[in-house]
Amino acid sequence: MLTIPGRPVRTCEGVSRRELLRVGGAGLLGLNLPEFLSWKAQGAAAAAKLDGKPKAFGAAKSVLMLFLQGGPSHIDIWDPKPNAPSNVRGEFKAIKTKVAGIEVSETMPMLADQMDKVTLIRSMSYTPVGLFNHTAAIYQMMTGYPPDKVSPSGQLEPPSPRDFPHMGSHIAKMRPPEGAMLPFVEMPRPLQESNVIGKGGAAGYLGKAYDPYRLYQDPNKELRLDDLTLRAEVSPERLKDRFSLLKGINGSMPELDKAVSSYALNEYYAKAYDLVLSGKAREAFDLTKETDKVRDRYGRTTFGQGALLSRRLIEAGTRFVQLNWPSVANGDPETTAWDTHAANFGPLKNLHCPVLDRSLSALIEDMDQRGMFADTLLVVTGEFGRSPRLGVSTSGNTNSPDGRDHWPYCYTALVAGAGIKRGVMYGKSDDQGSSPVDSPVHPTDLVATIYYALGINPETEVLNDLKQPRPLVKGDPLLKLFA
């Protein structure tokens, strides 16, 4: 009898997705993995009929999201204010970009050379309910819904199967990949604030079959892909024999076939078989296929190699890839966190921005040269920005004289590809970066735009855990972003 490596894991919600992908036993392959892949049968696309829709509706086949958890300072990266008072403009100078009239911080010189390929949204904005800290803001950005249970500190309860699904989970269901590929991948660590881990990062009431494939490893190191690797003692020929046997069994069970939507069970087994044996996913994760020159261009860092790996996954057919900045939301600003309460300028100058500048500029340049922007939407954002004034408290946190606090009222996101205008600034902030003065964009509008680019009507209704109809997101797509 074959065994499954690792410690068995069970939760009150059933088998974990990672466990479903551990292949090695007839029982596992014959039941759980095909059940996981049954999302294919449930993934009929929503009827997306929007009046006056531009050509960009449905232009995207996939989405690559770089999520800078912790809240990066918009003033010190994307939206410098050189004429503001010193306690607002900070220590960094503004530099020109390839696009006349658009400047960025001197901390992003390589990105400045790629500005002609992207749109900067400088009017991201929302008003929080109470002390709206990281977890609540992350949940809203990922699901398109504000949380309904926020503590006085801004914290949320741990993830629940009743949560609203991550947008990637909806996309995995409505736009499953063509062929055997992972539909939704998240890496290299979960979104986290204190002891609340992964809130807003799962499929919630859609069920665990639509959770992301979580590669919680450092892409800058050798990856272990046991989940997607056939065990040595199970040969492809033996697996084929098993599959043929299962097809024969299914053929004698017409009533069971009818119970599984419009697809026969042997199609589920076929997809499970393909995912494990095709090698397509394993190939995508193999960064040794890239030249040293390309890997160096992205930067030999966790985030840099994660960006390169994200590009490879999109090319292999993954619909939604989310690369998280590799730090907890409220970690140590002197090491990796964007949450710069205690120190803002030193960490940004010496660590954060050099890594982001190299990785993001390489990704934009690479995707453009490969023609990926024709059908891939790139989104770069955090959960909020930082306070324009230095040393003030806006979230109940203590800030150093050169620290910036949370600021959801105005911040910046970057988008590119799938019909998005190139070399454009959308919206505008005031002279201190404190609020939008033109075209404010709520995070849920950005979520709606992602659905729209994929050809999914944001108003499509789905049933929640109580079988109540709910729209995918309560936001409006930003049609003016598209050419």
Image (cartoon, rainbow, N blue to C red):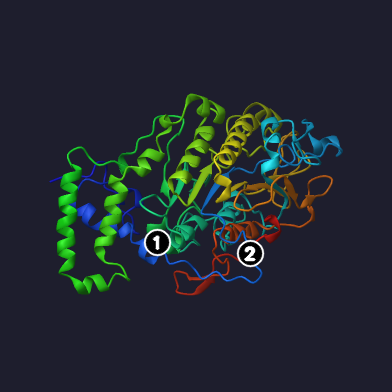
Seen at 64% across and 72% down, the residue is 51
Looking at the image, which is closer to me, 296 or 152?
296
CA–CA distance in space, label 2 to label 1: 24 Å
Label 2 crowding class (10 Å Cα cut-off): few <14, some 14-19, many 20+? many
| Residue 313, percent from left and from top | 45, 43
Could you say which disc has been placed on residue 197 in the image? none
| Residue 70, percent from left and from top | 61, 42
Of discs 2 and 1, which sits in the foreground?
2
Q: Are marks 2 and 1 in contact (CB under 8 Å)?
A: no
Looking at the image, is 155 positioned above or below residue 471? above
| Residue 264, percent from left and from top | 26, 66
Looking at the image, is 288 positioned above or below residue 54? above
> Which residue lies under the disc numbered 2?
475
> Is residue 337 something one can see in this rendering?
no
| Residue 229, percent from left and from top | 29, 41
Provide the secondary structure element on which disc 1 rests: loop
> Is residue 213 something one can see in this rendering?
yes
In which quadrant of the rendered view does residue 364 lie?
Answer: top right
* Amino acid tagged 1: Gly
Seen at 25% across and 64% down, the residue is 265
> Which residue lies under the disc numbered 1?
207
Nearest to N terminus: mark 2 or mark 1:
1
Looking at the image, which is closer to me, 29 or 325?
29
Provide the secondary structure element on which disc 2 rests: loop
* Amino acid tagged 2: Gly
Seen at 57% across and 63% down, the residue is 148
Label 1 crowding class (10 Å Cα cut-off): few <14, some 14-19, many 20+? some
In which quadrant of the rendered view does residue 280 lie?
Answer: top left
Quarter of the image for the C terminus: give it.
Answer: bottom right
